[in-house]
Amino acid sequence: MPSSRRIWERVPSRMSRKPTYLGRSPILSSGKRSNTNTTLGHRPRGPCGELDGRPTYPTRVEGQASGGEEVSMATTEELQGRTVRYFCDRSKNFPIGRPYNCCESVLLALKDRLGAGSEIIPKVGTGIGAGVALNGLLCGAVSSVAIAIGMKYGRTSPEENPQPVWNIVDKYVAEFEDKFGYVNCRQLTGQDLKTGEGLREYFTRIHDYACAERVEFAIGKALEILKG
């Protein structure tokens, strides 16, 4: 089993602008430079590489909470930017600490719309991301929206019919699968995230790119649904 240092030495962090390296340089043993993005601090293309200049905080105020206080409501673009930032920003102690997972990120961006506080969000999503604790099951960009739908439209007694909520969730699942081809993390990423190699490959090539696009899609669709 490789050491944790070797597993993570090629994982990029987008927080530093200057290329630096953990351990060895991305020069292969053959003497040729790798054609993959392996530097720490290289700002990738895709949603994670487009955060600069993107609005991420509310710029207008709409409505009132139940206690009468005003509630800031962000635009769709602002919430998409906020979601991607939650998802992309690596903690200073990475890889022990991790970016918010896909489920946590979407729910954090939606918490004002859902009226949920920090005692619920992001905690409810921590075990769900990466296909439920790295098991490659349902993508957190799907489960997070299902949770948000339940929080707004879910039933409060067994006598209520759950079918209306199932119909809303089922429609979203179909839209997600139609756009991305799959709904399970293992199929979407092509990686076993319980292995060091799979996790390294995920953070190097997939997390900041395809997965960031999926959380953007999730938040956009969730906002459409929650307006209904």
Image: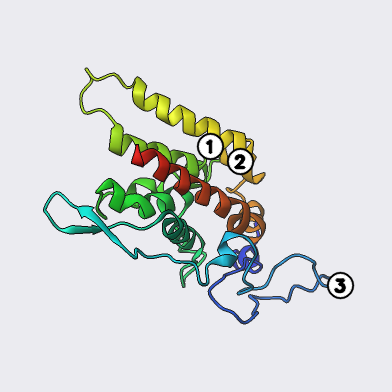
Q: Judge left or right: residue 199 versus residue 80.
A: right
Q: Is residue 42 shown left or right of residue 214?
A: right
* Label 2 Cα crowd, 10 Å radius (few <14 / some 14-19 / many 20+): some
- Residue at label 1? 137
Residue kind at label 3, given as amino acid type: Lys
Residue 226, horizontal then vertical, whole percent: 35, 41
The quarter of the picture where residue 108 lies is bottom left
Residue on which disc 3 sits: 32
Q: CA distance from mark 1 to mark 2?
A: 7 Å
Instruction: Tell me the amino acid under the disc marked 1.
Output: Leu
Alpha carbons under labels 1 and 3: distance apart = 37 Å
Q: Are marks 1 and 2 in contact (CB under 8 Å)?
A: yes
Whole-percent x and y of residue 22? 63, 75
Residue depicted at x 15% and y 58%: 69
Q: Nearer the viewer, residue 76 or 43?
A: 76
Mark toward the start of the polypeptide (1 vs 3): 3
Q: Quadrant of residue 203?
A: bottom right
Is residue 183 visible in this depiction of the protein?
no
SS at badge 1? loop
Cα–Cα span, label 3 and label 2 = 31 Å
